[in-house]
Image: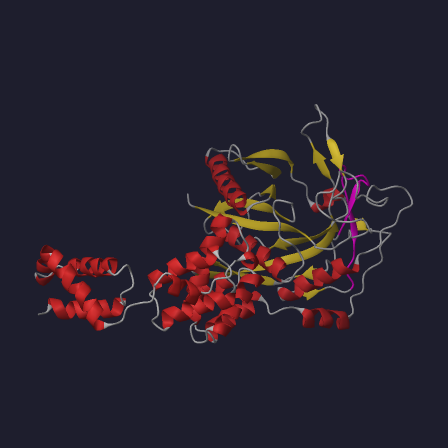
Amino acid sequence: MQWETVIGLEIHVQLSTLSKIFSGASTAYGALPNSQASAGDIALPGTLPVLNKKAVEYAIRFGLAIDAHINSPTIFARKNYFYPDLPSGYQISQLEYPIVEGGQVNIQVADQEKTIHLTRAHLEEDAGKSTHEGFHDKTGIDLNRAGTALLEIVSEPEMRSSAEAVAYAKTLHSLVRWIGICDGNMQEGSFRCDANVSVRPIGSEVLGTRCEIKNLNSFRFLERAIDYEIARQIDVIESGGKIIQQTRLYDADHDETRAMRSKEDAHDYRYFPDPDLLPVIIPQKWIAQVSAALPELPKHKQQRYIQELGLSSYDANVLTTTHDLAEYFEQTIVHLPEQNKLCANWIMGEISGRLNKEGLEINQCPINPERLAQLLLRITDGTISGKIAKEVFDSMWQNDEASADMIIDAKNLRQVSDDGAIEKWIEEVLAANQQQVADYRSGKEKAFNFLIGQVMKLSRGKANPAQVSTLLKKHLAE
């Protein structure tokens, strides 16, 4: 039997507010345990929640970015469960009337575009953190994280592979950073994924029993956990067993998911409206102000890059991965008009490759857009070849004050376009490679490329490649 995978993601985005969602306690990362927990965060009797306006604004910003509906009023509810790092015995969240409803994002997998619809995005407070290491069979509780503002983003179950799930998660990760509501630091828990996975026979409209894999904090783990869970569920069913609805954890060391507890439904949490928080009315005027302050969104930049700059869909997607990368590209083409593709290729190739190798972000790049444009100008005006440009690039990377022209002159790298000089190199190469000359004249085209390579080697890469090709053909035809 052939199986179809059905995947929905719940992504918890930690909002970049300076204080918590219902208290004034700091959200700074890395403080001493329990040093940033207010009376409300530890649920002391008599404390009341005060809603953080910035958290609401960030949620509105996200909703507008995905073309969703902003609910007004939006209502907070208590989600009741007991856990050591939840001192109140309930989490303030949203059930009915979440702040964001609907919306969609486009993803790209293997050159295929797909639209993923969102069910909702709601505000809630984070729980504390349980620590098990170093406590001699006991558990340490750190409540610094308790009360931190979260936006939980829930997709429709429209993804059909781990690759689609990762593409969707990466798209949202890029978007929340782009609009400035989250730093996206997965190692610090700012962006966490829960994956709901089920399988069903191909052609069936009935959803299979789902299992939720919790707290996946890297895209690699997300992909591997989903792939394992798909294989596990198919194996269980084909062996005559039944899938039990449950929450599972991914063990990266053993590359497997393990049962954690039976999966709860909404009614198990006994949601009810929080009596300490009134319904929140969001004026249309405020929504309009937030909308006006949004930067140009990735999807709009992509359209502009394709339609106005002549880039491919792939290039446009890569260049809008982050806001800083898009800005770097746009500043580069300001200094080198009409060379959009060349600029894009170098930024996606040499620049991004070196940044990845050294673990740097684009805003830490030692070659600024103006210096890169100066280097690329020397390719377009024939001063240097593309190969020599990479040598100049290496020197510019090591010396953030040296211009391309300074390095070209200091190393005598200017491209040779003089026919006489190139013909001397060609004559020397032909004399030293009589067998390859004979091979070419007998119809072996590969010999021509060999001879070009020898001329370029003899000229130390400085000969104009186009002229070498033209003049070499002329000599071989004699």
Q: Is residue 165 above or below residue 476?
A: above
Residue that appears at 67% across and 57% down: 121
Q: Is residue 361 above or below residue 418?
A: above
Q: Is residue 184 above or below residue 239?
A: below
Q: Main secondary structure of the magenta part?
A: loop
Relative depth, front residue between 306 and 155: 306
Magenta stretch: includes residue 295: no
Query: Is residue 287 shown left or right of residue 215?
Result: right
Residue 110 seen in this snapshot: no
Residue that appears at 57% across and 50% down: 8
Q: Residue furthest top?
A: 136
Query: Is residue 344 shown left or right of residue 176?
Result: left
Give the x, y percent position of residue 247.
Answer: 62, 39
Magenta stretch: includes residue 85: yes
Relative depth, front residue between 34 and 280: 34
Residue 181 seen in this snapshot: yes
Relative depth, front residue between 206 and 171: 171
Residue that appears at 14% across and 64% down: 427
Query: Residue 380 is drawn in which quadrant?
Result: bottom left
Query: Residue 441 is drawn in which quadrant?
Result: bottom left
Q: Quadrant of the N terminus?
A: top left
Q: Quadrant of the C terminus?
A: bottom left
Give the x, y percent position of residue 122.
Answer: 71, 55
Give the x, y percent position of residue 225.
Answer: 53, 41
Relative depth, front residue between 104 and 206: 104
Give the x, y percent position of residue 50.
Answer: 84, 54
The span picked out in magenta is: 73-93
